[in-house]
Each structure stands twice: as structure tokens, then as C-alpha cells.
Amino acid sequence: MEVTVGVEDAETGGHVKHVLSAERCVLVIFGITGDLSHRKLVPALYHLLRAEALPENFAVVGVSRSCADVDALREKLRESAARFSRTRELDPEVWDRFAERIHCVPGSVDDPETFRRLDEVCREVSASQNIGGNRLYYMAVAPSHFGPILQGLQAAGLVLETRGEGPWSRVIVEKPFGFDLKTAVQLNDLVAEVLQEEQTYRIDHYLGKETVQNILVFRFANSIFEPLWNRAHIDSVQVTAAEDLLVTGRGAFYDQTGVVRDIVQNHLLQILALVAMEPPVSLDADAIRDAKVNVIRSLRPVNLREDVALGQYEGYRAVEGVAADSRTPTYVAMKAYIDSWRWHGVPFYLRAGKALASGDTEVAITFRPGPGVLFGADDSLHENQLVMQIQPDEGIDLRFASKVPGEDMHIGRVTMRMSYAAAFSVQPGDAYERLLLDGMRGDATLFARRDEVEEAWAFVDPIISSYEDVTATVQTYAPKSCGPEAAEAMMCRDGRTWRPFGT
Ligand code: BG6
């Protein structure tokens, strides 16, 4: 049984964090002709301009081997913005205002001449639009180019040390940040040679999602849940990132990556950290990141034999770029424990996968049932559950028992729902809008810090080794299913069940 409760008019106010404004700057996008720029970055910038959130003095300088003709580049970006924009229809006036701010520098990032030319173009654009010397560099390229770009920027003297009031340089690094702990440390070392940590913005786009940010607000701006948020009251937590999409068009990349590197190391562990962290001492970037990293650092190594289930969907090996005998998992489920006072003994079940029955990202908190002395001992009826639906159908559900109307005392389960769409009557912006804006504001709260990234790799590395170096079983599962049987069996052993998709 399900009821949807009305939501009071959403009132806003009580800003607890001073909102910085976006500072004038040149946004340099390495990889302006690539997939990420077309699908995400340019549509996000268009929306920011439309919402008048971009600074007045602002320009984009794209770098790519294949962007010699700026008019052709602008036209291609317009087509993509129209295709991938969340509002579909582009406002031609807004687009034209945006397009005239786009410039390009053709060249390879292995060539020092590219960086010399880039500097020249940035200076020209800055002078003509009164931008000053601020530059935000965005590495929207394959990870193999991160090193050459950092070195190229350094050699050409294009990274300014951020001190006080002077012009700044910041660098946004796309994921994947490293391939394992060793390579992440190497990349971090290189980053540290070129940049200060405060200039480094490691993207995890999940942190830009409204619903992920709301975990913090939900937990710490309300008084009723936090007293229950511990091992005394919580039975278990499930964090799910299920996708119904197949691996198409990126087989070669995915086959090297697999679901653990692609989703668990970053998105899932970030969500877990927000759900499980202690209250941060303030809302400053470092205070929040300190609280998150403590969670990741407290994760107990997973029992690889019993508490991990790996799967690969049928048909995956036929994807272009995927090895015919690939053992790369497209699904993983695991049970993790956080060795802390608050969470001792509470299992955190994590699962992520492609080609599943539906696309659902959510956090489900199951509370311990009360004693069944009055209404019978059917735990499932008394089991209160709080579900934070990250996407789609963004919202929060609270499930509890209720008397079913009638002469007898029958108990049913009902769900009370807060829906973002109903409460706020706006479509949430894309995560990249928020993250680009934060880069221009100099707010690193929603970006991962060095230690977070390394601790996350330290946690997942043994899981990756279990199927890459040792022959842990990778079961096949049917597309559009709930994943491999091993995942069900793992839950069954614990006397629990996975939350069905799409509920
Ligand atoms: C990316 C992964 O980081 O996140 C993709 O590389 C995945 O494989 C994507 O599909 C999911 O993001 P979202 O925002 O669509 O949930």
C-alpha cells in the first residue's frame, strides 16, 4: 500500500553557507571536440549563461587537435547543445551570446607550441573582454593526456600560484583519477608538483547532483533522524547505482575499467561517505572532506570470498572493443563494514551494474524492527525504511506500518513521499552546471581531495585484484535482470533481501 503525502510549499532561506559568486575567467577546455564537452560541458555552460549565472567577463578557449575552424566548432557544439541540453529547445539569442565567447586553439598537448599559442589566445581574449588573468583549466580528455597537459602548463608557466588577491589558475581533473592506488598516487604526485591542492578540482560528478548534496542537508538540517542514525537503530544500509544502459560506444575503455573502477571507487564510495560521516565541524570544503575521508579510511577490507558478487551481462563480450574472453565485471555487489563507534556491526551493501532491469540510484536505510509483542512478529511489517532516491524520480520515501481501515486490526505498510519535482517545481540542474560554477567560484567542497581518492583506491584495489590477478568468479547475468545469482545468494545468507529495482 502506498500513499503520497502533499508537500508544503517549499520555502527557501536560512543560507548557512555564504554563496560565492563566479569570478571572471577564461575557461580552457582541453578536449573541446570530445564526447564530454559535447554531451555535458557545453550544454551545462549554455544553461548557466541562460540562468545568468556565468560571470559577465567570461570566455571559453577550447584546445583540440581537430578544431582549426572556430565557426565549424561553434556549429558542432550548437548541434550537440540542442541534442543534449536538458531543455532540448535552444534559445537562439542565448546560444549566439554563448557562441561568440567560444575560441579555439588547434594542437596536440604533447607539443609545447600548443601551450604557447594557448597563452597567446587567452591573453588576447582576456584583454578584449576585460577578464584579467584568471584561468580555469578543464581536462576533458582521456587520462593518458593528464600528465602531458600538467607538464605542458607548467613548462609554459601557465599555472599561477594562488595567493591572496592576484589572478588565479585552477585545474579541473576528470575521472578516472588513476587506474589503481599506485597510479593514483603517481598522478597525485605529479599534480602536487604543478599545483597546490587548493587549485586542484578532482571531479566526481555525483557530488554535483542535487540529491547527493541533499544527503548532508537531510541529515544535519533536521533534528529527528540524526539521533537514530547509528548502530543502535539501523539494521543495514543499501546503496545502489543500477543502470539499464549497456556498454555501447565505449567498449575499449570500459573493458579496461569495469564497474568497480567506474562506479564504486568514486560515485558509490562518495555517497556512502556522505551517508555515514560524522557531522562536519563546519561547511568548509576541508571540514566536509575530513569527515568523508574518515569514513572511507574506516572501511574494513571486504571479505573477498564471501562478501563480493561479480557479474558480466550476456552479450557484453560482443561489444566492439571488448576482448572476446573478457572477465571484466559489469556488475558488482558487496558487503562492507565501517569500523567506527557509530557503525560497528552495521552492514553496508553496495551494488552497481549495467544492463539491469531499471536505472535506479538510491540509498535505503533499514531501521531495526521494534519488538513484535503487540502486533505480531512479522518483521517485514514493522521494518521502517527510509529511501533517498538519487535518480530518477528524485525524492525521499519513508516507509512505515499503518492500520488498514476496517473492523479488524490489520497492519499494512505505507510510504510517505517527498518528491523534488512536487516540492520545488523546478527541474534540478545537471551536475556539471553546479561543478563548473563551483570551479569558477573557487569552492572545492564538491570535488574530491587527494586523500579521499587514495583511500578509495586502497579499499577497492583488493576487489579488483581478486578478478584480475586471481580467478574470482564472474557470473553471467541476463540483460534487464537484477544481476547475477551470487548477489542474491549473498543477501540470502544474511537473511535479508535486496530492494527490488524501481520501487
Ligand atoms: C560515469 C561512468 O562516471 O557515470 C558511466 O563512467 C556511468 O559508466 C555514469 O554511466 C553514470 O552517471 P549518471 O549521472 O548518468 O548516473
Image (spheres, grey):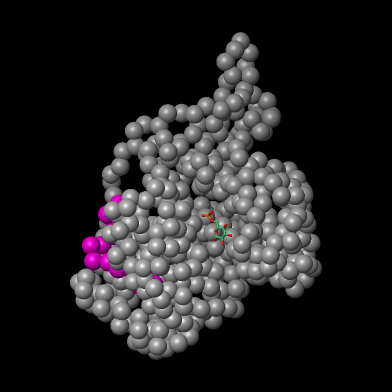
Position in image of residue 100 (x %, y %)? 29, 65
Tell which of 487 and 138 is nearer to you.
Answer: 138
- On the rendered structure, is 275 left or right of 18? right
Q: Is the N terminus in the top left, top right, bottom left or bottom right quadrant? A: top right
User: Within the magenta stretch, is there residue 62?
Assistant: yes
- On the rendered structure, is 216 left or right of 98? right
- Viewer can see residue 99: yes
Look at 52% across and 68% down and name the residue there.
175
Look at 46% across and 48% down and name the residue there.
211
Position in image of residue 43 (x %, y %)? 41, 57
- Viewer can see residue 467: no
5 to 431, vertically: above or below: above
Read off the magenta span.
Answer: 49-63
Position in image of residue 273 (x %, y %)? 52, 58
347 to 439, vertically: above or below: above
371 to 495, vertically: above or below: above
Tell which of 462 and 251 is nearer to you.
Answer: 251
Q: Quadrant of residue 2?
A: top right
Q: Quadrant of residue 56?
A: bottom left
Position in image of residue 35 (x %, y %)? 50, 64
Tell which of 163 and 115 is nearer to you.
Answer: 115
Q: Is the C terminus in the top left, top right, bottom left or bottom right quadrant? A: top right
User: Within the magenta stretch, is there residue 149?
Assistant: no
Look at 30% across and 66% down and name the residue there.
101
Residue found at the far top of this picture: 407
Look at 69% across and 30% down and name the residue there.
378
- On the rendered structure, is 71 left or right of 183? left
What is the total number of numbered labels drawn onto the structure image? 0
214 to 49, vertically: above or below: above
Q: Quadrant of residue 179?
A: bottom right
Which quarter of the frame holds ligand 1?
bottom right
